[in-house]
Amino acid sequence: MSTHPPRKSESPSDEQAHNTFNFDEGLCNANRSAPKVWNDASLRNKVSLIVIASATIGAAVGVLEAKFGHLTWPLFFGLALSTSLLIAFARSWVVSPVDKLIVNVLDICTINSPRTIRRLPTERRDEVGQVARLVQRLATQAVKDSHEISHLRRTLSSRIENATRRACSQLETLANRDPLTDLCNRRALEDNLGPLVAAAKATKTDLLAVMIDMDNFKQINDLLGHDRGDELLTLLANIIRGSIRHDDLPIRLGGDEFLILLPGCPIHRAQQLADNTRKLFMQQTKLTLAQHKLPVIPNLSIGIASLNHDRIEDADTLMKCADERLYLSKQAGKGVTTIPDAEPLHLADQREETNVNAKRLPGDGDESSRLSDDQTPPSNVA
């Protein structure tokens, strides 16, 4: 077998040719006309011809040597020349085509690219051409199968990735959403409250916590059933969702308690939000429960806490402050909003009455009146 110089590795263009390779192109090479006559002859005939030529030359040399024994050296050189020619013919006609075919097959096994497949000597008519065409069919089918497998793998990977992404999104939604109202739940509150407080302090903006509790909910729930109670909860959730901004975070804490986190919101804006929410809720519940004669009517008690105005340092304190203001609203007779640095309306009215009575005491005069006016705090919104 002859040795061949090292082959260059396939360039990136060979890999790109996969997409444009005509898999049936090589099969058409069998129909090409043979460039040489010897390509049409089989290897068996070529080998037989070389053997016959060798025997003929050997016999001729023997006859000449017997007849002209004194011509030994010329006969020797003639025999050597004939043998060299026969070896060269055998190498060119038999060994070299087989050797090239083996090299091409090894290339296809190593680098199964269109260029290596095109190198096969499929135009030959002998046994080498037959083997080359068979290898070409097998290699072409292998390339087709490889492309199909790669396409299926990419498609499957894409579908698995999309399905995984949808499943993770659904799990995240289920984990952070209240199933009844579709608002955020306590887990979402734990995940977002700390970062919101940190962001407000970093940007030197305010963060308000509006805590809402439905008044007389238990009595209505007991009188009309849990279905009606769920309707009221869903109604309030929809009102809250339609009243807030995009950056606000509505949360159902549990039962009939709700929370709204308002980043970068002024206190008067939160107070307006509380007023509108209560007003819409009262209007809708009157329509919903009009056919029922209830001893109590649903209302909303609201407490508002401010991160900056109340000088709060952490998330837990903000929640505690909002909860305390909600408790003050409950104490004031329900249906009340308590804002930072303000008393519930009921307590403010009592204090106003006390100040009026103090004005009537003898000896106080105008000074007592001015003092009571200065100490009257702003009232809450009922």
Image: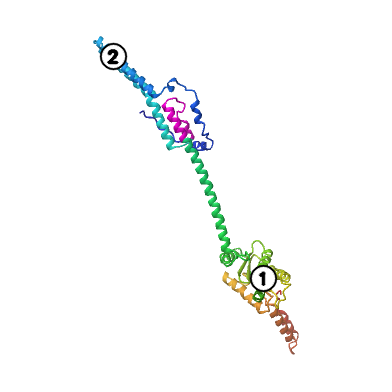
285 is higher (above) or lower (below) than 361? above
The percent coordinates of residue 377 (x first, y second) are 70, 77
Whether residue 208 is visible here, answered yes or no, is no
Mark 2 Cα shell of 10 Å, populated few (<14), some (14-19), many (≥20): some
Q: Position of residue 307 (x, y in %)?
A: 61, 69
The residue labelled by disc 1 is: 228
Distance Cα–Cα, label 2 vs label 1: 121 Å
The residue at 42%/28% (across/down) is 128
Of helix, strand and loop, which one carries label 2? helix
Give left or right: position of 282 versus 86: right
Residue drawn at point x = 61 percent, y = 74 percent: 323
Which residue is the site of mark 2?
61
Nearer to us in this view, 336 or 198: 336
123 part of magenta stretch: yes
SS at mark 1 in the image:
helix
Q: Amino acid at mark 1?
A: Arg
Indicate which disc, 2 or 1, sits on the residue closer to the N terminus: 2
Position in image of residue 138 (x %, y %) = 46, 35
Main secondary structure type of the part rendered in magenta: helix
Closer-to-camera residue (83/285):
285
Q: What kind of residue is marked 2?
A: Val
Q: Is residue 15 magenta?
A: no
Quadrant into which the N terminus falls: top left
| Quarter of the view holding residue 108 | top left
Q: Can you name the residue that lies furthest to the bottom here?
A: 362
At horizontal 56% and vertical 60% (from top left) the residue drawn is 172
Q: Residues within 10 Å of mark 1 (few under 14, many from 20)?
A: some
Which residues, given as a range, are shown in magenta? 114-138
**Residue for point 73% across, 82% down:** 370
Nearer the camera: disc 2 or disc 1? 1
**Considering the image in quadrants, where does the C terminus appear?**
bottom right
